[in-house]
Image: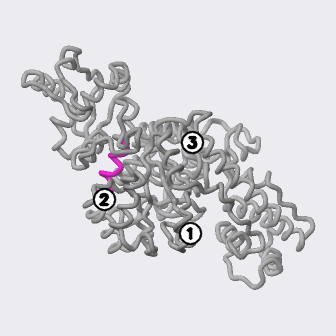
Amino acid sequence: MARTMKGNSVKIFPEKVQILISLLGEPEEGELNYAGKRKPMSRLEALKELKRLEIEGIIAPPKRYGWVNVHIHTSESFSIFRSPAEAAWEAYRAGLEIFGINDHYTVTGHREFGEACKILGLKAVFSIEAIAMSEEAKVKGERYNDPKNPGRIYLCGKGVVQDLKPDSPGNTLLKTMREALRRRYEKMTEKVNEILKGIDPSLNLTFDDVLKCTPRGNVTERHVAQAAAELIRKKFPNNHDLKEFLRKLLGDIKINLSSDEGLQDLIRNELLKAGGPAYVEEPAEAFPNLEKLISLYREYGAIPTYPVLGNPITEKEADLDSLFDELENYGIFAIEVIPKRNTEERLREILEVAGKRGFPVFNGTEHNTKSPQPLVDDLSKKADFLPVFKKGAYLILGHQFLSRYAGIGYIDSTGNLAFKDRAFGIPFFSFIGRITWPDDVSEWLMNIGKENTLKVALGLHLILGDKQCNWVVKPGFKMPNILLNAIKLRNKQTIQIDYKARENFEDIIKTFFMVEE
């Protein structure tokens, strides 16, 4: 038997199962961190085999708790998860229902993540994160959701539904941001190398070493620290020698030398952070203004979302009503929280103000370090908070579905709410997100056209929307053309349907819609 640990959970599996699990984190050919080691199967193939073993009873299925987490990072930015597939497996085993990838400056992990979630039966949310800058707030010394840097604003695009066009303004902006950050990390690497060589000339840290910590070169400051830590650890495998080297490098320090994460954090905090000898100032072009970053997310078809820091309470977050007024002026109508960073009292305050405002609230755990931690924190499990987070997660799922099949998302092409009446719009998108569609029905919806798909969605909400449950659609569900033609769409928001047509609509629903167990 073999054992693996993630967060607070310990799982014991047969050795052959553990081998498959280990494959989920192995780099694959074509990735920068691939070392040429031949694998018996790909990550997704290993995942399919694990699912098959579960179906055959060799692996006990996980308990399903219905929890949600729509903000985790993977190896595509920086994370304890070595691949999107591994992240999906851990979420599945932890009993989550809805799971969301949210890497910095990239969507390259979305395809693997989506396929992995589909194999496991997880509902997948696709997002991206980057940083904007308010020069006015920077000058005033006012902080938003970065507690150490005035003016900096972390912003997410939730529910990415399309790629950027190669020649689009958004793609040009993203490329500019990434190239500026890469130049910074190259300079950091050079400085770290000079420092290390000054103590031991045999040490040589290159930017290629840093790149090999990533699958596709999306480097972060944490990767520089990781590459340096791995080089030092390899040179000094003996703890006594390692401690002596670190004493020369940093002076007297206290650290658990058995922890790779601790060594990486030490190097990052002592060398790379502001005031450290390898610090390089962040280039201004890496942080566009808020309007440009929001426009980039709209090109992705995503929902611009402000992550409320919550704790500590910053100057801009001290008055939530004022903050939300500002967000609306920018075209931001949704917020996100990382509950474990908050007190229960502060989290409750954030959710209450968001509820009054008509803002959906999304939740997550980040997982952008190498330290193990649960995928669902205690506050996200609380009966007071879980329904709010599930409603938000369902809204993103509904946004993703309707954007693809009906041409309408939570935010329209101009950056405004697609449904001005928030008391209708939020429940409508959340309702659609609670439906599981079989492949043949999804294909039918794609073929009938966006307007007819919207008619179907609005009709379903009209008839089933007051029932707070999840729905599973049986294969074969269709509406005859004569019925679709009888439904009139008004202002792309409401439908007009006569008594006979509604009766026929309800009969079809009764045949094909089942409450999810």
Which residue, as the protein is rendered here, is positioned at the far left?
A: 499
**On the rendered structure, is 231 left or right of 116?**
right
Horizontal and vertical percent position of residue 306: 44, 58
Crowding near the residue tagged with mark 1, few <14, some 14–19, many ≥20 C-alpha atoms within 10 Å: some
509 versus 218 height, above or below: above
Residue 421 place in picture, x, y as percent: 23, 46
Q: Earlier in the sequence, mark 3 or mark 2?
A: 3
For the point 21% across and 17% down, the residue is 485
Q: Furthest-top residue in view?
A: 482
Q: Element at badge 1? A: helix
Q: Name, please, the residue furthest toward the bottom.
A: 252
Q: Is residue 457 shown left or right of residue 320?
A: left
Magenta stretch: give its range: 386-397
Disc 2 element = helix
Q: Is residue 360 above or below residue 253?
A: above
Q: Mark 3 or mark 1, which is nearer the start of the sequence? A: 1
Marking on residue 138: 1
- How many angstroms separate mark 2 from mark 1 (CA)? 35 Å
Residue found at x 22% / y 16%: 480
Q: Between residues 159 and 179, which one lies in front from this camera angle? A: 179
What label does residue 386 carry, if any? 2
Residue 425 falls left or right of residue 39: left
Q: What residue did someone put label 3 on?
A: 170
Verify CB contact (< 8 Å) between mark 1 and mark 3.
no
- The quadrant where residue 497 appears: top left
- Disc 3 and disc 2: Cα gap in Å? 34 Å
